[in-house]
Amino acid sequence: MDPKRELSSIDLGALVTELGRYEGAKVDKAYLYDDDLLRLKLRDFDHGRVELMIEVGDVKRAHAADPDHVADAPGRPPNFAKMLRNRLSGADFAGVSQYEFDRILTFEFERDDESTTLVAELFGQGNVAALDETGEVVGSLSTVRLKSRTVAPGAQYEYPASRLNPLDVSLDAFVRHMDESDTDVVRTLATQLNLGGLYAEEVCSRAGVEKETPIEEADEGVYRALHDALGRIAERLRSGDIDPRVYEEPLEDAELDDPDADGDRPVVDVTPFPLSEREGLPSVGFDSFNAAVDEYFYRLARDDAAEADAPADASASRPDFEEEIAKQERIIDQQEGAIEGFEEQAETERERAELVYAHYDLVDEVLSTVREARENDVPWEEIEETLAAGAERGIAAAEAVVDVDGSAGTVTVELGEDDLAVELETDDGVEVNADRLYREAKRIEEKKAGAEEAIESTRRELEAVKERKAEWEAADEGDDGGSADDDAGSDGDGDDEAYEVDWLSRSSIPVRSPDDWYERFRWFHTSTGYLVIGGRNADQNEELVKKYMGNHDRFFHTQAHGGPVTLLKAAGPSESADPVDFAEETLREAAQFAVSYSSEWKDGRGAGDAYMVEPDQVSKTPESGEYIEKGSFVIRGDRTYFEDVPCRVAVGVQCEPVTRAIGGPPSAIAERAATSVTLEPGMYAQNDAAMMVYRRLKDRFADQSFVRKVASADRLQEFLPPGGSEIVG
């Protein structure tokens, strides 16, 4: 039986009343563990120290914890925890409520200068959002941008759409919702009535109704019995008539006579009152549901840790090559679909541009009419009405208009035999609109080129997995009883070790933290071993050139404004260097680094141009009468150009010879990382993309605590370019 990992709506309803007992407690400090567990430390006059725990990851819970169950404070607080400390320190806990029948708890905190609301979303991906007095989001663990709702800093917080509350639904409404289903009783209760599987089964048991009764066979007596059973559960929750239970796995026959087995069995569930569906399972009673929930999740974490530390059998130590191969093949299928989509999109944009020119006079008449009206301060609504009236009179230009968007300053026309919709910006003329469409087609083609590069990278990764599988199988055939991990500790060629040590499947990876001088800059090592460093701001750009640029280094920069100073180092800062004939691969990796961390990425472009010069061509002396901003330089003489360099970075985890997060051009990172994720410019904010990368990397390692130590989302974010990103491989 799989243990419960998320509190249900009924569980939260039972918890709310008990958590309200801590009203008036003062907040001392906020902590964030593993990017999904929030801890608020409070002081209460009656209860002393109160530890409020809110977890929204794989486990979803919210309760006050016994201080003995709380882990030591983590290290440097991430930005979200810092924000909460600023807003909540010294604030009074003013109450908690459940949002309708949803798995959402709202915690209120009051302070003389400002009040704060914490919304804990204990469903789906999970989230915690901090709101100000107006309901505006100050910060959140994750940014949500959906058609139905938005949770993002600066936006008004939006709750999910309301759900039916089965605990206060009338009999008529209950019958109506049940009759809308075409399945059986228990599934209808679980989905249409929002009870979930366990409590749907419990209601059937308490009502004496066969769970698999088809809805078409359910009569008034069945519905009334079910509704009455729901009412009895609701009344117990409202009156506080609870009898909490923590349920455990049943004892095996061999354990029945073991007096020490009690209390060490794995837990499987926690409920506010005994359930018929859990009869036969050993259980432990508690005085409060909060205490039961705390004990349950404390023991669940202990059970998970014990399972993770359990020695694996020989078959389990073998990496799941088949799954990895299938995964890479799925990625290739998705990338091929994306390439086809880019081709279609680019072709459609070109067709739109050509249609604009083919219907030049009509488009010009539409744009001129709207522009003239706006110059005369005619409201957009009136413009739309005028165009609609013109269409009724058969005016061709007006008939072509199918939409007017005053907020965006655009009109949409349908052109050509297929009535292809073309959005036009009314402030621009025909040529500018057509050119914009051509540029959009080119931008999409650049994304296609990037996708083609990504698919080649994925194919190489697929081949590498197949090679590892073949080597593993060959080693098995000639195995003399030793293991890959045993061999990894012996002397030999370092390249052999890369194949022998499967870091992803190791149950424990020792942390070997580096202390390198260049880590405060942007940096990576090329696939040929040379260090590349870049500035994060104008001050660092100045410092790199003045302090760290050697005579035989190479200076890189982008053609576009807003790029970092990038140095390809011939030697370390205190080492003497000889002239170096850098390989073309090394130069292109440095150019890709310069482009990817520039404004090209922030502007969403798929590629950009970079140039390279010698150190003696870089100067802070401007031409007469000119001024140079801080962090900028004058470049004199010939330049070596690198054109159409893809905007692409990989972020991964290095395990040998040191352990740390690394990032840079994919071709360089793939050589050094145990595993990595590739990104390109996209829609996800930097912190959200970092969290997505963190979760993907963490899931690949058996030792997930290792990833949390060396490659947290905050550390990974340092390797992501400024602007939006999306994962492509």
Image: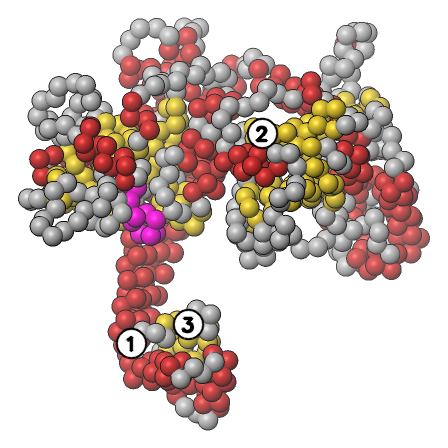
Q: In which quarter of the image is the N terminus?
A: top right
Residue 409 image label: 3
> Pointer 2: what residue?
31
Residue type (three-letter) at the residue carrying disc 3 = Gly
Task: Tell me which corner region of the image, top left, top right, bottom left or bottom right, holds residue 326.
Answer: top left
Determine whether, in the image, residue 289 is placed left or right of residue 569: right
Vertical placement of residue 268 versus 60, above or below: above
- Closer to us: 164 or 16: 16
Question: Which of the two labelled residues, at mark 2 and mark 1, occupies the earlier sequence position?
Answer: 2
Vertical placement of residue 381 versus 641, above or below: below
Q: What element carries label 3?
A: loop
Residue type (three-letter) at the residue carrying disc 2 = Tyr
Q: Distance between the residues labelled 3 and 1?
A: 15 Å
Q: Give the range drawn in magenta.
A: 594-605
Residue 430 image label: 1
- Tell us which disc is closer to us: 3 or 1: 3
Q: How far apart are marks 2 and 1 (CA)?
A: 56 Å
Percent position of residue 569, x then y? 18, 28
